[in-house]
Structures are given as C-alpha cells and as structure tokens.
Amino acid sequence: MTVRLTEVEAYRGEADPGSHAFRGRTPRNAVMFGDAGHLYAYFTYGMHVCINVVCGAPGVASAVLLRAGEVVDGLETARMRRSSARTDRDLARGPARLASALGVPLAANGADLLAPPFALRLPDAPVAHLAGLRVGVSGAGGGARFPWRFRVPDDPTVSAYRRHPKSHD
C-alpha cells in the first residue's frame, strides 16, 4: 500500500510545549529521543494509534506527526481497514485514520521506516505547501510561536483545521 502524504505537523521535543517530549524522556516517548527515520507510534483517546517520523539527532527529541494522506496504491486494502470511510478521500484524512488505513499497529513503535515492511521515500521534487497552526494544540504550544502544520494547498485529503477549544491564538 502506498500513501502520498498531504499533511504533517512538526514537534520540537523538550523546547515545544505541544510535544510529548516537552517534560523529558518517558517510556512512552523514548523513541522520539532515538535515531531519525524511526516510527514513533502512540495511543490516543484510548482507541486510536497515531504515527510520527522521528527526525532529530539521537538524544534530542523531535518528530513529525503524519496527519493525512492520499491512498495512491492499495485502495481496496485501505477500504477494508477503514470500512467506515464515506469516500476514498476520507480513508487517510486525519492522523488516526491514516495509521488505520496503513495498518500500522502500536506494536510498530520504534520500527525503522527505511526497512521492510516500510518504504519511506521522499518526493523527487519539492512539493508546494502551506504552513499554519497545529491542530488541537493550545496555549504556549500552539499559535504563531509554532506554525508547524504543513499541508498541500487545496488537497481534498487534508484534514479540517480545528482550533483547540482553549486556544488563545
């Protein structure tokens, strides 16, 4: 199965109040402090897996949340995994939906994304994108200080922006 990423969010570890690593290393976020190119998977809302690519130097927590994508190969598999999706554009539209469509379990936490069964590849040419506020991040972790949500302009698979209810941004 292949997904073209259309939306991501960056998190800068201990320097970023919105990051899982803001308060330091824990058993949950330890992968974020490891080698770049590995998968940081976590459970959220007691029911969903979300996935990130670790991107910092070893010992320095940093990751990019994979927020949304377009399924470009393996559509039938994605439809089976996400049978509740109303349309194909909704198969991987949102971080939990993306992880589900890809079939990435929590047990994949720490996996090397450059080794099978994964095949993370960068595009051959730069991709036009827009930067903006992260989704669901409030207070000091949100807003203009960290405009680190990057998305392909006008792509229908990009998730809808929902401002955090306590945000002052």
Image (cartoon, helix red, strand yellow):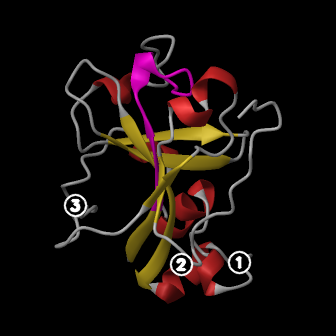
Above or below residue 8? Residue 117 is: below
Q: Residues within 10 Å of mark 2 (few under 14, many from 20)?
A: many
Sequence order check: which comes first, mark 1 or mark 2? 2
Q: Which residues are magenta?
A: 7-20
Task: Inspect the magenta stretch and tell me whether residue 54 lies in it.
Answer: no
Badge 3: residue crowd in 10 Å (few <14, some 14–19, many ≥20): few
Circle number at residue 78? 2
Looking at the image, which residue is at 36% across and 29% down? 32
Tag 3 secondary structure: loop
Separation of marks 3 and 1 at Cα, in angstroms: 27 Å
Amino acid at dot 1: Ala
Mark 1 packing: few (<14 Cα in 10 Å), some, or many (20+)? Answer: some
Observer-nearest of 162 and 114: 162
Residue linked to disc 1: 85
Label 2–label 3 contact, CB within 8 A: no
- Measured in 3D between alpha carbons, the distance from the residue under mark 2 to the one under mark 3, in whole angstroms, is 19 Å
